[in-house]
């Protein structure tokens, strides 16, 4: 049996990476992330996230994320799934839909088509949205952050609202978990959401 692909999704600083790690350990799944979890991906991550002061077009950004995803699926995700291993990825197609589709305004449908081309049609079995709730959207950390983190609050609000719209439109593929509790509470809620939907 092929493994299941579960994506952890959400904005900046919602504890997504911690939750991805905890979920992967609990499911005995392979933990991976985007962008940057392959040799090529590491170079793409630096190209797309390093603030150089030079503009990067929104479409180029979307295509770089897609190129990272194509390599990630070919080199890491697909072989693991084919070997029967579950995979937990810290970000997947949902991130491109929310950030490039909604945040950059490229449109979720077009961005989805690009992503599905990149993955050869593979999408995740479940996307878990860690929603930080109302209040300051995606609080900026003390450091200036990378090129995308440094975007204006309005951009991050569009990303947050985009994520919520994606989850509402496709409840079969998306689960929304309140990310505002303790790490342990959120981990339990994430695990419960996964067990409710997938036989893992
Ligand atoms: P990270 O902070 O979770 O490592 O993600 C890196 C940044 O890349 C984060 O700001 C979200 C952004 N991103 C996109 O804009 N589109 C994508 O498809 C992915 C995977 C990440």
Image: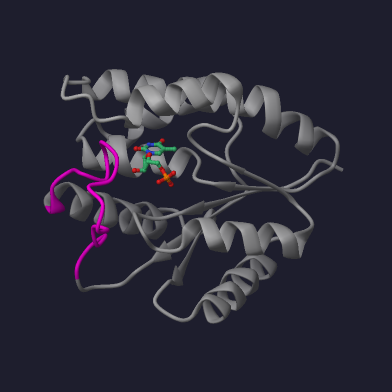
Figure quadrant of residue 136: bottom left
- 16 part of magenta stretch: no
Q: Choose top left, top right, bottom left or bottom right for residue 22.
A: bottom right
Which one is in front, 152 or 66?
152
In the rendered image, the vertical position of residue 172 relative to residue 67, given as above or below: below
Name the side, left or right, on which 78 lies relative to 105.
Answer: right
In the picture, which quadrant includes the N terminus? top right
Left or right of 141 in this view: 115:
right
Residue found at the far front of this picture: 143
State which region is magenta: 136-153
In which of the image's four quarters is ligand 1 placed? top left
Residue 130 visible in the shown view: yes
Position of residue 105 relative to residue 188, above or below, is above
Report the front residue among 116 and 135. 135
Q: Is the magenta stretch mostly helix, strand or loop?
A: loop
Q: Which of 183 and 130 is in front in this view?
A: 183
Residue at 60 percent across and 26 percent down: it is 38
Using the image, determine if residue 31 lies above or below residue 112.
below
Q: Is residue 7 left or right of residue 168?
A: right
The C terminus lies in which quarter of the figure? Answer: bottom right
Q: Percent x, y for residue 11? A: 34, 54
Left or right position of 2 against 15: right
| Residue 20 spot, x, y in % from top left | 58, 57
> Does the stretch in magenta take in 146?
yes
Instruction: Identify which residue is drawn at 48% across, 20% down.
Output: 67
Q: Where is residue 19 in the image (x, y as percent from the top left)?
A: 56, 63
Q: Is residue 120 visible?
A: no
Q: Measuring from the top left, give residue 167's x and y in whole percent.
A: 41, 57
Residue at 26% in and 60% down: 138
């Amino acid at each position: 049996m092929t493994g299941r692909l579960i994506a952890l999704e959400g904005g900046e600083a919602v504890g997504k990476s911690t939750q991805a790690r905890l979920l992967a350990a609990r499911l005995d799944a392979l933990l991976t992330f985007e962008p940057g979890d392959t040799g090529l991906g590491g170079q793409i991550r630096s190209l797309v996230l390093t603030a150089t002061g030079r503009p990067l077009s929104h479409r180029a950004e979307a295509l770089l994320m897609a190129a990272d995803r194509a390599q990630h699926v070919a080199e890491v995700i697909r072989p693991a799934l084919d070997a029967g291993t579950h995979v937990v990825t810290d970000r997947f197609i949902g991130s491109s839909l929310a950030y490039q589709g909604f945040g950059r305004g490229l449109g979720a449908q077009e961005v989805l088509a690009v992503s599905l081309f990149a993955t050869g049609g593979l999408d995740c079995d479940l996307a878990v949205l860690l929603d930080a709730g109302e209040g300051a959207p995606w609080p900026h950390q003390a450091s200036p952050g990378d090129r995308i983190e440094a975007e204006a609050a309005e951009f991050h609000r569009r990303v947050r609202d985009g994520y919520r719209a994606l989850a509402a439109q496709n409840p079969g593929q998306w689960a929304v978990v309140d990310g505002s509790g303790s790490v342990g509470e959120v981990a339990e809620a994430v695990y419960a959401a996964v067990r409710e939907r997938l036989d893992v």
